[in-house]
Image (spheres, rainbow, N blue to C red):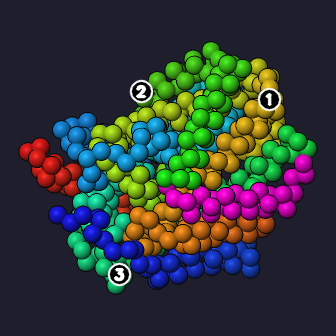
Amino acid sequence: MKNSNQQTEGVIDKPVLIISGGILLLFVILALINQDMVSDGVDYFFDLSATYFGPIYQVLLLGTFIIALVLGYSKFGKIRLGNVDKPEMSTFRWISIIMCTLLAAGGVFWAAAEPLSHFLTAPPHFDVESGTAEAVAPALATSFVDWGFLAWVSLGTLGTFVLMYAHYHRGQPLKPRALLYPIVGEKIMRKKSVFGAIVDIFSIISVAAGTIGPVGFLGLQAGYALMDLFGLPNTLTVQIAIIAVLVVAAGVSAATGIHKGIQLMSRYNVILSIILVAAIVVLGPTMFIFDSFLESFGVYVQDFVEMTTQRSDLAWLGGWMVFFFAWFIGYGPMMAMFVSRISRGRTVRELVTAVAVVAPVITTFWFTIIGGTGISEELKNPGSVSGPFNDGGQPAAMMAIAQNLPLGTIIGFLLLVATVVFVLTTTDSMSLTISMAITGNGSPSRWLRVFWAFLIGLVAVVLVSLGEDSIDSLQSFIVVTAVPVSLLLLTTFWTAPHVVKKLYKEQGFE
């Protein structure tokens, strides 16, 4: 058996680096030349992919969840991945990094806005009157569909099993193309493999686009928050300055690696999030939060399959569930790489429990605390949250919720800090992971990590300068890039059980 320690230092795959970075820059150049043309083109392909690949996205995530649970809680759950006898980091640090990196892809922005949106306009598959007490559970349960079990399971289960097998147990480079290693063999891992390069390029573009969007939104969110909290002007200059500071911090953190910057920020941000949760639960509508979570989670579990597979309103699906599913699928290969990098020594059951069970439950409770508090305030005083939300969008929703609480300014500021660090953690983690994909090495060179952090920031700055519509176009572009990535992840339906069975025999369980 080959061991990953036998690998030589990772070598930069120049075609993958040049083409993936070039396509992102081309997107920006085209947006600068003709923003309307880019928006129209992206919208056209968005509609096509959402319509024809929406069902594939739904089946892919549902199937991944079912297979992951079967593997995790069967005899295969005790398999230890990574070719070492014990985990490299503590469980708290491990879960902290997972939560901060994966949730930050947009969960902080949407925790306030999505439940409120579904409360104000009831989802089509629920026959309730919008804006009433009966609309609370459907609104939260619909948000859980987008950010719950299926969102998380795509980011660190089946694909992670395959990548850890290929890299740590078979000594192959840690690249997205390694997902196909059990099918194609070593030939796809060769540097001259055109098909392997295409797989890597699509995976990099998809995750880069998915990261640039939150970075851009952060500039808008933080600019609005600073205006609302401290009266600072919410100008383009302020938004760009915020993104610039974030990118510099992300570059420094990415350069220090997983065991320093990323781990440190994740740990302290989880502690900050726990403090925020406790403060909002105590100062906010405590019983409403717990009652709503219990009822909404019950609706979510009871109607899980029906809500996940419903196809009754394609326009609504394209704006919500299919959009989010495509976003997470686009993150799938690269997040699987990142989780592989931090999970050496973990068992299959530990991975499934942490990523597919514990993290989604925590996320749904977080959505109930933030979004449920906003809904509660809206029920008591109509317009108190929906008014700012309708006028200022997502950034205004979170601040309006905070300002309706005792110590609202302090809570609003802490929410802003948490948001910044969540996005910062995602940016530096994905800069590291993209660099890993280009080199095939778990510890790529610092300059490459910093380069990707700055490229992501540069694209975000240009798109913010062009206006919020440009960021929206990039977000829609994610759904398009998820098409080839979804086909790649479908292979894990066979490869994940296949490699798990092999490891089960190799580790002497049979």
Disc with the residue nearer the chain's start (1 vs 2): 2
Q: Is residue 280 magenta?
A: no
Whichever of callouts 1 and 3 sits on the residue coming sooner in the sequence is 3
Classed neighbour count for the residue bearing mark 1: other residues with Cα under 10 Å, few (<14), some (14–19), many (≥20) = some
Measure the alpha-carbon separation of dots 1 and 3: 55 Å
Residue at the spot x=46%, y=69% of the render?
444
Residue 341 in the image: state x and y as whole percent: 40, 56
Quadrant housing the C terminus: top left
Q: CA distance from mark 1 to mark 2?
A: 36 Å
Q: Main secondary structure of the magenta part?
A: helix
The residue that appears at 13% across and 53% down in the rendered structure is 506
For mark 3, give the secondary structure. Answer: loop
Tell me the quadrant of the picture where the N terminus can be found: bottom left
> Which residue carries the number 1 mark?
408
Q: Find the magenta span and give its range.
A: 232-258
Amino acid bearing label 3? Lys
Whether residue 152 is visible here, answered yes or no, is yes
Q: Which residue is mark 3?
A: 191
Query: Which circle, 3 or 2, is nearer the viewer?
Result: 3
Task: Where is residue 425? Give x, y as percent.
Answer: 58, 52
- Of residue 367 and residue 461, the one placed in the foreground of this image is 461
Q: Which mark is residue 125?
A: none
Circle 2 Cα neighbour tier, 10 Å, few/some/many (<14 / 14–19 / ≥20): few
Q: Position of residue 180 (x, y in %)?
A: 29, 66
